[in-house]
Amino acid sequence: MVSQSDNLIQVKKKRLSQQYRDNITGYLFVIPALVYMLLLIGYPIIYNIIISFQDVSAFNLAQGSARPFIGLQNYKTIFANETMKIALWNTFYYTICCIVVQFTVGFLLALFFNQQFALAQSLRGFIVVSWIIPVTATALLFKYMLSPDVGVINIILQKLGIIKQPIGWLINEKTAIYGPIIANSWIGIPFNMILLSTGLAGIPNELYESASIDGASSFQRFWNITVPLLRPAMMSVLILGFMYTFKVFDLIFVMTGGGPVNATEVLATFSYRLSFRNYYFGQGAAVANVLFVILFCVALFYLGLINREESM
Amino acid sequence: MKGLNQRNKNIILNIVAIVIAIIFLFPLYWMIISSLKSDSEIFMRPPTWFPHKVFFNGYIDQLTGPYSILRSLKNSFIISISSMVISFCLAVPAAYGVSRFELPGKKLIILVFLVTQMLPISVLLTPMFLTFSNLKLLNTYIAPILAIGTITIPFTVIVLRPMFLTYPVSIEEAARIDGCNRFTAFLRVVMPVIKPGLITVCCFGFVYGWNDLVYSLTFNSNNALFPMTTAIYNLMNQYGTRWNWIMAYGCMLVTPPVIVFILGQRYIISGLVGGAVKE
């Protein structure tokens, strides 16, 4: 005879083993990708930290000899390097300029294309094409358009009477950083616009309608309905934009290679130069880690923000 | 009267929109017409807004000349299609796994995918280079293909997860009652339902692989393995100011992604939005 509690245990056991089997099936779906990520992202991140505390150069790599641990020496060396300070400054300056331009213009365009007219949808979709184009091609194209002798941007600016003499955008140390900023805006503005448009589309029309019945002006409607409701979308666009922009590499690498005289050197290009031009792998890894730590802090801030919004 | 105002407003809005689109598409126009100009016309001042005489030399030379583009074109296709297939096979099941199962540690797994998307390439380059060098993988197609997967796999998971969450579970349950197990149900029933999402991640998988410059540049020194991006970076100095040549190369470089964009615009935009919005 089977007692009732025994029966219950049986059922529970069966349920548990069902749950267990389900978990195994679930992990089977996830594990291949997870292993890939552990080997090709997790392991390199840890390895990069180790390298940054070692003396790794072309010399001891070629010798196959041990790489001595040298503590914080690589970090001391890079922070003593004048280029590191320039690269840090340039990275922040570039990022902030890009964000301000792409967010402001992107937001205005999102508002504009959010209106009801025939071509709104199709044209808005079209200008996102810059996002899909290889950054290498974008960099070359803007390098050409910004060149002092045949660059079409100088010619247009002269025709409009904004400048008198052609500017040697990428050649002049003072203006060089604006070259990649302009090129990046071409990619960043449509990107910001499309993300903010999605946010705008999610705001119910009735809100605006009832507000205008109550006599709210269009500015009041914008300030009291659009801005607060769009705030989550704006925050994630700004933070993601920061992260995408802060790790800039290809664009500057192809347009200026960090020059002239470090005028456009950013953390990513500096790290690359140390590792793969000078073969100071330890120092290159250290610079990459500085970049990583800054981005990691921003990512934590972002995740905290998401969590707070979800719990609200 | 009001209707007329509305119509005028509509016309003005459309015109402004066209002007904005022209400004944004101008760089592409400039790339195309510059690629068709002759050596003398490219240096003409003021510049010609349309080539007086169309020259295809920039293209013909690069298709048949000493630095034939065809080899790089083939390499670009090998690298981008392989990385697309790898990330598809690994990431689509993973996205399904983290959406449809109540796994212990699921939140952490999703977090890992979300955060790795934001990782700077610089952090991976040096350790990957040293590891691939030990494994004798430098100067192979495998090195860049594996490295590109680190971008496309997290992207695919993040984009597909919401799609797996939105379709009704009942479809899948019905299939299981009919005798499918979880794997066959996934392949035969779930995959067809999220086809738009799969198209999105394929477009992006291809484009990310196609657009990679730095992995091939760093891991391969043998230019027989260079994709188009790396090849043009290395030719840049040789061509100097022959911008018509460089722009012709650029046009050929952007054509495949632009075709993908035109054919799959809807999917691309949904991917852009899906990859960026919060979890």
Image (tube, coloured by chain):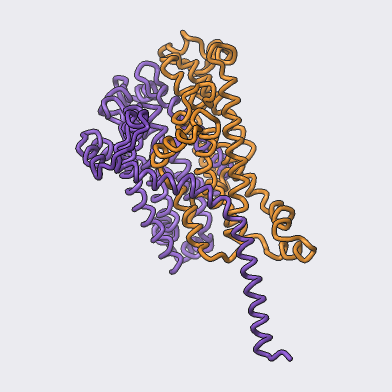
**Chain letter matching colour orange:** B
Q: Chain A shown in which color?
A: purple
- Location of residue B99 with respect to B64 vertically, above or below: below
Q: Position of residue A127 (x, y in %)?
A: 52, 37
Drawn side of residue A93 relative to residue B203, left or right: left
Q: Residue furthest right?
A: B178
Which residue sits at x=30%, y=24%? A163
Drawn side of residue A41 relative to residue A91, left or right: right
Say which of B164 and B1 sits in front.
B164
Residue A87: name its quadrant. Answer: top left
Q: Position of residue B181 (x, y in %)?
A: 73, 61
Q: Position of residue A71 (x, y in %)?
A: 25, 45
Residue B165: name its quadrant. Answer: bottom right
Say which of B42 and B11 sits in front.
B42
- Location of residue B241 with respect to A201 vertically, above or below: above
Q: What is the total number of numbered labels drawn onto the structure image?
A: 0
Q: Position of residue A115 (x, y in %)?
A: 52, 49
Say which of B67 and A261 sits in front.
B67
Residue B7 shows up from this direction: no
Residue A63 shows up from this direction: yes
- Location of residue A264 with respect to B42 vertically, above or below: below
Which residue sits at x=63%, y=46%? B89
Q: Residue furthest top?
A: B40
